[in-house]
Image: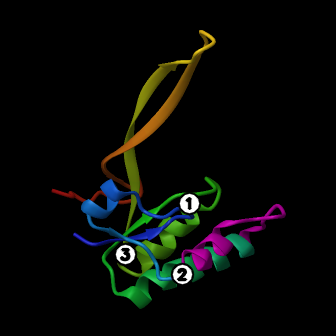
Amino acid sequence: MIVLNLTQHRATPEQVLAGVVDLYDQNEVSKLLTFSDVPDRSTLEMRANAIADLAVKRGVRFAMIGGAPYLMPCLERALLDRDVVPLYAFSKRECHERRNPDGSVSKTMVFRHEGFVSSASCSVELK
């Protein structure tokens, strides 16, 4: 299964092993996912359609999405209208503690990719 990464972040090595491929220019999608002002409905739909068109250009069936929660319903709909299944990455958080020389403890959270969750607006079996 090939999954196009339509998030602002590059795919992790674990996601790449799971079939995620980055866009050639991740900045292109980052610009579309970033809002400097409160967006109206028209702006949300325009951005969602532009992002969904990136998936169509790549000819994929699945797309990993994420970003501003207020954009995701429009993006899900735009992808589904183009027969692209929107997926969200599921990760487990691992906490690693390290004792510092001064006795304090530093914690680092590591996110491990575990799979994908299909959108609530569609039910696709991924197995």
| Residue at the (57%, 67%) spot, across then down | 74
Image location of residue 105, percent across then percent down: 56, 16
* Mark 3: few/some/many CA within 10 Å (<14, 14-19, 20+): many
Asked whether 85 or 111 is in front, the reply is 111
**Residue type highlighted by circle 3:** Val
**Residue type highlighted by circle 2:** Asp
Asked whether 120 or 85 is in front, the reply is 85
Determine whether, in the image, residue 62 is placed left or right of residue 105: left
Relative to 73, residue 49 above or below? below
**Residue type highlighted by circle 1:** Met
Q: Mark 2 sits on what residue?
A: 25
> Is residue 38 on the magenta stretch?
yes
Look at the image and give the residue range highlighted in magenta. Answer: 25-41
| Residue at the (57%, 18%) spot, across then down | 100
* Residue 85, picture quadrant: bottom left
Q: Are marks 2 and 1 in contact (CB under 8 Å)?
A: no
Please name which of the two marks, 2 or 3, marks the residue nearer to the observer. Answer: 2
Where the C terminus falls, by quadrant?
A: bottom left
Residue furthest to the top:
103
Q: Mark 3 sits on what residue?
A: 84
Please name which of the two marks, 2 or 1, marks the residue nearer to the observer. Answer: 2
Pointer 2 or 3: first along the chain:
2
Residue furthest to the right:
37
Relative to 54, residue 35 above or below? above
> Is residue 21 on the magenta stretch?
no
Secondary element under disc 3, as helix, strand or loop, is loop
| Residue at the (44%, 26%) spot, across then down | 95
